[in-house]
Image (cartoon, grey):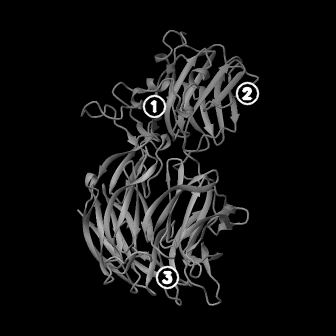
Amino acid sequence: TDLRPLDILSEAVPPGGPARGMRVFQVQGVRGFQLSASRPRALGFPASRLFIHCDRFPEEFSIIVTLRALRRPAKVSAAGRARRGDSPGPPLRARAFPQRNEYIFTLMVEESPSVLVGLRYAPDKLHFLFWSQERAGGWQTRVTFPNVSLSDNQWHTLVLAVSGQSFSLTVDCSIPKDVVVETPFPASLSVRRASFYLGNRRRRKGLFTGLLRQLVLLPGADATPRICHAMNFKVATLSVPTVLQDVPAKPVSNEVLKYPYETDMKVTLGARPRCSKQEKAQFWFNVFRRGLYLCNDSTWVSMLEVQHRLDYVEEYQNLVTNSETMGIEVFTIPKVGLFAAMANRITPPGSAIYRWTDGKFVHYQNIPTYQAQSWKYFTIGKKIFLAVANFEQNERGQEFSVIYKWSRRKAKFITYQRITTHSARDWEAFVIEGEAFLAVVNHREGNNHNIDSVIYRWNPRTGLFETNQTIPTSGAYDWEFFTIGPYSFLAVANTFNGTSTKIYSHIYIWLSGSFQLFQSILTFGAADWEVFHIGDRVFLAVANSHSYDSGMPAPSNFYAINSSIYELNITAQMFVKFQDLLTYSALDWEFFSVGDDSFLVVANSFDGFTFSVNSIIYRWQGYEGFVAAHHLPTVGCRDWEAFHTAEGSYLFYSSAKEPLSKVLRLKTT
């Protein structure tokens, strides 16, 4: 022999495409043949087509196989079913899954039922079979490799090297399994009038049910060094039929694929999933954008997408609340549903949590709160939490803000940890270098607005938040955490220092285990920071609520004041002013997107004369910046939340002046 690879699988494929009984499937970005049990003999060909010059099987050789075997379901015994309460009977076995033994290939003489050479696998075992004719009548030898797990729905490449009495199996280029047997492989095994059969032994029983990609015989050599230089050992290739080879990502022309194939297509719904080689050729359907995307092993490529544009906003639901609402937190509990926590001012009855049911928010749970200002939803591992910022003392004169934990058994939030706060306005939860933190904004203590706000660190040993760092703040309203590349930032909105609202708000950067001052920005009664990205650009918007200085003449209107948008300047390593927008006692910004368009909505609360003020949606117009697009009538607007459901996109606003909040629906074209 000339030691060239003998491609058994390619020899079984006619020039025009797969033979009858063979179908091409693509799974995990890799193609393979699925074999049919209807005509086992059709999956064979004479050995003489490979052994042209010699009718003897090589004495030393390697067999290379790439396959994907189906996962086997666990058998359930009659006793096991009885414990479960099922009817008695014999052990159950799904017909569509692998049987006890499945043949990868066999070499058989036409007039004999015996297997000259074959490879089959059973649960956690691989058997190599060969026929010995040195004694009268001959016998079959089976070499077994234990602890070989192939039935896991993953691709695997096997290299079986044979030399005399030594047999070595390498799976996915791992450490070889070596077996030495008493009977050596025959030095002269005739293949005259013999045929190769793919995935069977000329019978339907024992048919290979998985996918077969590569089956190669390499005479005279151990193929392991030739295989185990590839990057992906599980699908390492020595020789693969043309129909199974990869095609270019983009066709050269509009011609139809030469070899049609089927794919084990999986369409993922929901949030953007991971796209890697494992997910190659899988689809993701983005419900919100109504787009279909294909994973090309690194990024999601748009295949079909409906580009929506915001047309107008319509009133969708009027939600009567326990009292005036200072803040809203919309969140989703996995496998439970969409919720909205309302920070209500009056106690009792406290604050309410609503659940999205049949397209509307429906009351779900009441929680005692004390002039609640805001809620923050966050998770730590599998634990789900909801923290409330209480502004006033409880009935006992104690001033606590409370962290609640979701009870899966009760399907409600229950008290988990109380933390002493001082007229708390806001919580912010974040993770840095794998550690969980929770920051509270303390607004004032008595009449003193210049007090410390506190950052707490989660202690996994005690399961509690513990003080990690204090930061001086002045009548603060809001924390905003964000990351840029490897850096973590925390911005505080300082509102009032006791004499003036014209004070600096600060941005801190995490360095050497703590937050350190990064930049100070002059603000006017800052009530909120909102960070957002448009393409590669990073913006930070501040909501300025009013301009007051006890030492200066009163302006004509304290509340008609510019709120500002800042953009990160990478060269200067700081945020620089990008745009001013006239607002009326602005208390909140909310960024959201519709299709490819970006928007900011501001919560205008008071214009100096009335609380019935239009809040405005601004559309991103590139060079023009943000331009007013929609004027929304609101009353004492305090907070905006954008959210999406399968039915569409919505804006939710709370009123600090009446017990009524509104859900608005974004109508698109």
Q: Position of residue 18 (x, y in %)?
A: 38, 31
The residue wearing badge 2 is: 179
Marks 3 and 1, Cα distance to the nearest angstrom?
67 Å
Q: Name the residue rendered at 27%, 59% in the picture.
A: 308
Q: Position of residue 401 (x, y in %)?
A: 60, 77
Q: Name the residue rendered at 62%, 79% in the picture.
A: 400
Rendered image quadrant of residue 170: top right
Whether residue 644 is visible, yes or no, is yes
Q: Foreground: 364 or 506?
A: 506
The residue wearing badge 1 is: 43
Question: In which quadrant will I find the C terminus?
Answer: bottom left
Can you say whether 323 is above or below 10 in the image? below
Three-letter residue code for mark 1: Leu
Q: Foreground: 531 or 115?
A: 531
- Left or right of 410? Residue 372 is left
Q: Foreground: 625 or 38?
A: 625
